[in-house]
Amino acid sequence: MSTKPLDKRTIIVAGGGIGGLTVALTLAHQGLRVVVLEKASGPKEFGAGIQLSPNASRILLDLGLGDALKEKWTLPKNIRIFKSRTGEMLNTVPLGKLALERYGSPYGVIHRADLLQILHDSCQASPDITLEYDSNVDELAAYPRGVTVQATNVRTMKIHEFSGIGLIGADGSRSNIRKQILDDGPPKSTGFVAWRGMVSARKAPDGFSGRFTGLWLSRNLHLVHYPVRKGNWVNVVAVLRQQSPGEGWSNIGDPDILNAHAKSLCLDIRELIATVKEWRTWELFDRPPAKFISDGPVALLGDAAHPILPFTAQGGALAIEDAAAIATALVETDGKVPSAFRLYENWRLSRTARVWRESRKNSQIYHIPYPMNIFRDAWIRNSQPLDLLTRYDWLYGGGKTG
Ligand SMILES: Cc1cc2nc3c(=O)[nH]c(=O)nc-3n(C[C@H](O)[C@H](O)[C@H](O)COP(=O)(O)OP(=O)(O)OC[C@H]3O[C@@H](n4cnc5c(N)ncnc54)[C@H](O)[C@@H]3O)c2cc1C
């Protein structure tokens, strides 16, 4: 990351999720002041895990978060791929030391609340970052030399105005900022619903705890699990094709629906599913790649810019890459915001579109029906483990400007 300092001027960030807090840090590292407006009352994250592939962990480590991450994350040794009907292990994708050596940064897994807390604490420790919680961003007005934003304090209902040389919309897949600059409607449902839950490692059935990520494939559902909180908990995500579970994107799931999808799967999977006490459901949305993600002094980042299916585990990683790219673009353009945001957009559009396509492709491969699943399973079984990793060299070895 370049260390050439920029003038002390203010950039406003709408949204204090993974993307918003990371961009606050990358901009402050370049000498800018940042105001983050977040509608929640503090750093709140849903109780689930997140995988941090090397393209993301590299940026977090560059920001000096290594010690804090080491306290909280786990570095899985590999990804084990299973056939869900029979429980057969088809292959393993090496991670651990090999990923570290190959990409220069580790592949980690962490509880989302831990990651958000680490980012929040680091922002709070920076004299150049102001975190304004309870602030719902409503209106923006862009001028040639900057932008003014109106935000409602959700406790007092008072309206506050914030001005800066630029605005970054990091306000998630239903971004209000996107609506105001692109006005391209809400994201589309993909017909998939993710079921998320946690199991204490002590209570998890044999074979589901330990330093590895499990990926279980079947037409009816695919399931991913990995350790969080130093291996004391197992994060479980099952994804099925299902009708919308209703308004809101984090509802309590009715286990009968999940059990019906899992009834033809092996006992191991059914036991794991039965061990999870509470399931939360998230309808999965995405958008085809946009033609632009900036407009003058306003840019979009993370899910606001490019919401994707989680089948490459990259939505958060791309938000982190965006954060690094936007700061680098500002340095390269001497802090000229509209030019920097255009450069950022040029760097990011093709890579994020490629990840969107890859995620869509994996949604087909993971849920492929009989008899094509026989060919998929044979291909995985007969692949060299290293080849299963290196087909993602472009992703894990790539990064902020590509
Ligand atoms: C099942 C599942 C598994 C996933 N697994 C992975 C994974 O393993 N690895 C990975 O990299 N990614 C993963 N993702 C994707 C990842 O969770 C998202 O891409 C990531 O959280 C996006 O971060 P963000 O900061 O852009 O948006 P968000 O996390 O949605 O944050 C947006 C923030 O903006 C705030 N906000 C919204 N509107 C306003 C407003 N008007 N004013 C002020 N604040 C506002 C919100 O409160 C929120 O805090 C997964 C997603 C799902 C659904």
Image: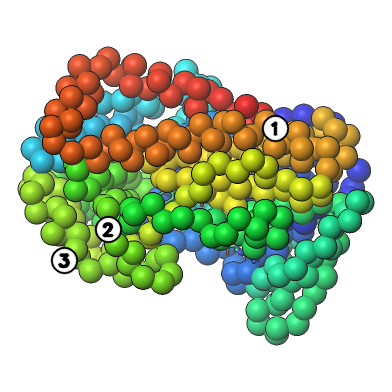
Q: Image check: 291 left or right of 380?
A: right
Q: Which mark is residue 346?
A: 1
Residue at image point 26% right, 26% down: 92
N-terminal of the pair, mark 2 or mark 3, is 2
Q: CA distance from mark 3 to mark 1?
A: 47 Å
What SS does tag 2 mark?
loop
For disc 3, the marked residue is 256
For disc 2, the marked residue is 242
Q: Which of the pair 331/242 is nearer the observer?
A: 242
Q: CA distance from mark 2 to mark 3?
A: 13 Å
N-terminal of the pair, mark 3 or mark 1, is 3
Q: Residues within 10 Å of mark 3 (few under 14, many from 20)?
A: few
Quadrant showing the C terminus: top right
**Picture quadrant of residue 277:** bottom left
Q: Which mark lies nearer to you, 2 or 3?
A: 2
What SS does tag 3 mark?
helix
- Tell me residue 236's x, y (percent): 29, 51
* Amino acid under disc 1: Asn
What SS does tag 1 mark?
helix
Residue at image point 84% right, 57% down: 142
